[in-house]
Image (cartoon, helix red, strand yellow):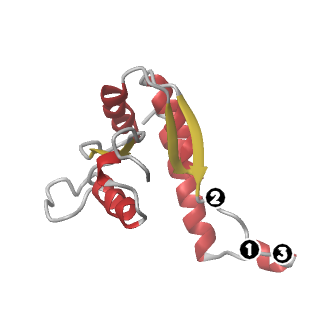
């Protein structure tokens, strides 16, 4: 990075997961992201931590307080992006979506292998149901 003074700011948003707020010895999501980005060479001066939010809605509201009317690049998991965009719009933030970690099927499987139950399928179904339910109740 050439000059640290004029770098765009990266807002790392995410507190402790619900139910773990009282565990002060645990890192917040924002703190964990900060350490990863520093390890990747991003200067600490470019990072802004918002580590009090516990939900996607709170991520958006607390980010709005930091960015005001500035347009942002929203980076999150592909499966989580629809709900994130919805919450950021509701908070009054203009956000461009940059989804990550797309879930893809490895290779081609025969029909019998695709219809048999798998633990991974249960996990993916759980993730999808959580996102659809949270989107439906605007959580």
- Crowding at dot 3, Cα within 10 Å, few <14 / some 14-19 / many 20+, comes out as few
Which residue sits at x=35%, y=46%? 4
Q: Which mark is residue 106?
A: 1
Q: Position of residue 138 (x, y in %)?
A: 46, 32
Q: Secondary structure at mark 1?
A: loop
Q: Residue furthest front?
A: 2
Which residue sits at x=36%, y=22%? 68
Residue under label 2, please give it. Answer: 102
Q: Position of residue 111 (x, y in %)?
A: 86, 75
Q: Quadrant of the C terminus?
A: top left
Q: Secondary structure at mark 2?
A: loop
Q: Which mark is residue 94?
A: none
Frontmost residue, 119 versus 28: 28
- Crowding at dot 1, Cα within 10 Å, few <14 / some 14-19 / many 20+, comes out as few
Q: Position of residue 64 (x, y in %)?
A: 36, 27
Answer above or below: position of 33 versus 133. Answer: below
Frontmost residue, 34 versus 83: 34
Question: Sequence order check: which comes first, mark 3 or mark 2?
Answer: 2
27 sits left or right of 74 in the view = left
């Amino acid at each position: 990075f050439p000059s640290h003074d004029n770098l765009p700011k990266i807002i790392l948003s995410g507190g402790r997961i619900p139910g773990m707020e009282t565990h002060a010895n645990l890192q917040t999501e924002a703190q964990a992201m900060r350490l990863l980005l520093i390890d990747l060479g991003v200067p600490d001066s470019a990072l802004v931590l918002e580590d009090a939010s516990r939900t996607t809605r709170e991520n958006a509201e607390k980010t709005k307080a930091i960015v005001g009317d500035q347009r942002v690049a929203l980076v999150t998991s592909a499966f989580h992006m629809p709900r994130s965009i919805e919450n950021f719009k509701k908070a009054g933030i203009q956000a461009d979506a940059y989804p990550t970690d797309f879930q893809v099927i490895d290779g081609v499987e025969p029909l019998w292998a695709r219809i048999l139950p798998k633990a991974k399928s249960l996990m993916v179904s759980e993730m999808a149901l959580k996102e659809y339910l949270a989107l439906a109740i605007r959580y």
